[in-house]
Image: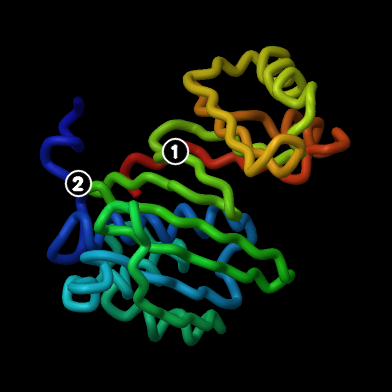
Amino acid sequence: MNLFDILGPVMVGPSSSHTAGAVRIGRMARRLLGEGTPRLARITLSGSFAATGHGHGTDRALIAGLLGMKPDDERIAVSFEIAQQADMGFVFSHENLPGEHPNTARLELTAHSGKTLSMTASSLGGGRIMVVEMNGLRVSFSGDLPTLIVQNRDQPGHVRDVTTMLAMSSVNIATLNLYRDYPGGNAVMIIETDKAVPEEGIRLLLDIAGINGVTFVGAEKEG
């Protein structure tokens, strides 16, 4: 445990769960989309995010994160207006998501290129978050460590391909988790590492048949 875990994040807003965590959720979705500010964001709020999120600024915090702001950014309060200036459309709705943490949001993003991303994440308190769904697959990662996300077909050899690349790049694996929708279907690897994955390693993976997407997000404990 470190000082940040005890005191919580430096932030703007009344609640680390509803504000700082919501900013981090938006930032994570932006980084996973990988194309800067999205063209359109459809955001579903669940649980206490839906019940009290507007009063705590959760909606503005999520939009601020999608714009690339951090939890201590003074512009969070006017993020709606900034999004309009940036030509980012957004729509909010409320829905009960059974089985999820009370502070949960589902974000469906469309980039200007047409690329799409679905991500569901929960705010756990103290500014900490957990991503629990990505593009329809159940996952579990926080973004507290450098994280490599590989989307692939569920077929033999891809775990070997990825771990071999990491070994050749001298990148140590902290955790490795595998998820799939059904045997032979879509799968995703979530690999937390001790340091950044080099760009050439990512390009190598993208050239392998059956690997459909590779995303690396660096550690971001403070937002």
The residue located at (19%, 46%) in the rendering is 126
The x and y percentages for residue 99 are 34, 52
Residue 120: image location, x then y, percent: 45, 56
Please state which amino acid type lies under the numbered disc 2: Gly
Q: Nearer the viewer, residue 51 or 218?
A: 51
Q: Nearer the viewer, mark 1 or mark 2?
A: 1
User: Quarter-wise, where is residue 8 in the image?
Assistant: top left
Label 2 packing within 10 angstroms: few (<14), some (14-19), many (20+): many
Mark 1 vs mark 2: which is more N-terminal? 2
**Residue 131 x, y percent position in the rendering:** 43, 47
Query: Which residue is painted at 44% across and 72% down in the image?
Result: 43
Q: Quadrant of the N terminus?
A: top left
On screen, 139 above or below 44? above
In this view, 146 is above or below 120: above
Location of residue 75 with respect to 157 vertically, above or below: below
The image quadrant of residue 219 is: top left
Residue located at (33% from left, 53% from top)? 100
Residue 126, numbered label: 2
From the image, tell me which residue sits under label 1. Answer: 141
- The part of the image, by quadrant, that contains residue 135 is bottom right
Determine contact: label 1, label 2, CB under 8 Å: no
| Left or right, residue 67 beside residue 116 | left
Q: Tally the marks.
A: 2
Residue drawn 39% across and 86% down?
Answer: 81
Nearest the eye: 142 or 135? 135
